Image (tube, grey):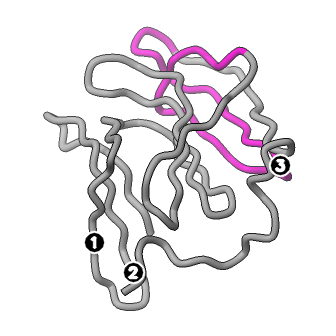
Amino acid sequence: MVVVGGSDGKECFSDMWYLNLETLEWRTNKLAEPHRRLSHSATRVGSYLFIFGGHDGTEYLNDMLCLNLVGLQYESRQIIGKPPSPRGYHGAILADSRIFVFGGYNGGGAYDDVYVLDLAAGAYLPQVTSFVVGPTE
């Protein structure tokens, strides 16, 4: 299980923690490029976690972060097309080779739209069915 960012109601976090579900041991990893994030979506695609939007403690965002779950670091990926408006509290699911982003809130109003990120050309979904999160000992 991977936990990215979040908030305690006072502070917006940029850390990343993972729980080994076999040993029930929590670990953290120092991110080379931390991103403060709360109310975002996190969608697992193969050995990546696609993190969309949310809030950084100051404003709502509409960026897409790509966290490599094996190396536990963010990787830069080119996203083409018009992104959704900045938002948090939205839903996101993976269906076939697309991430669907539903609704959300921007601090002033709620959205009732749907955006689609097509991953087919990016080859994120190949034959990755089993991997280990984080560094092995």
Residue 44 placed where, x, y %? 61, 57
Circle 1 residue:
27
Q: Nearer the viewer, residue 113 or 30?
A: 30
In this view, the residue farthest toward the top is 108
Q: Quick check: marks 2 and 1 in contact, CB under 8 Å?
A: yes
Q: Does 122 lie within the magenta span?
A: no
Q: Earlier in the sequence, mark 3 or mark 2?
A: 2
Which residue is at 67% across, 56% downward?
A: 45
The amino acid on which the numbered mark 2 sits, given as a three-letter code, is Asn
Give residue 97's mark.
3
Helix, strand or loop at label 2? It is: strand
Question: Residues in magenta?
Answer: 82-109
Q: Is residue 18 left or right of residue 28?
A: right
Residue 52 placed where, x, y %? 54, 35
Give residue 75's mark.
none
The amino acid on which the numbered mark 3 sits, given as a three-letter code, is Ser
Which residue is at 42% across, 63% downward?
A: 2
Circle 2 residue:
20
Q: Quarter of the image holding residue 121?
A: top right
Q: Is residue 41 left or right of residue 30?
A: right
Helix, strand or loop at label 1? It is: strand
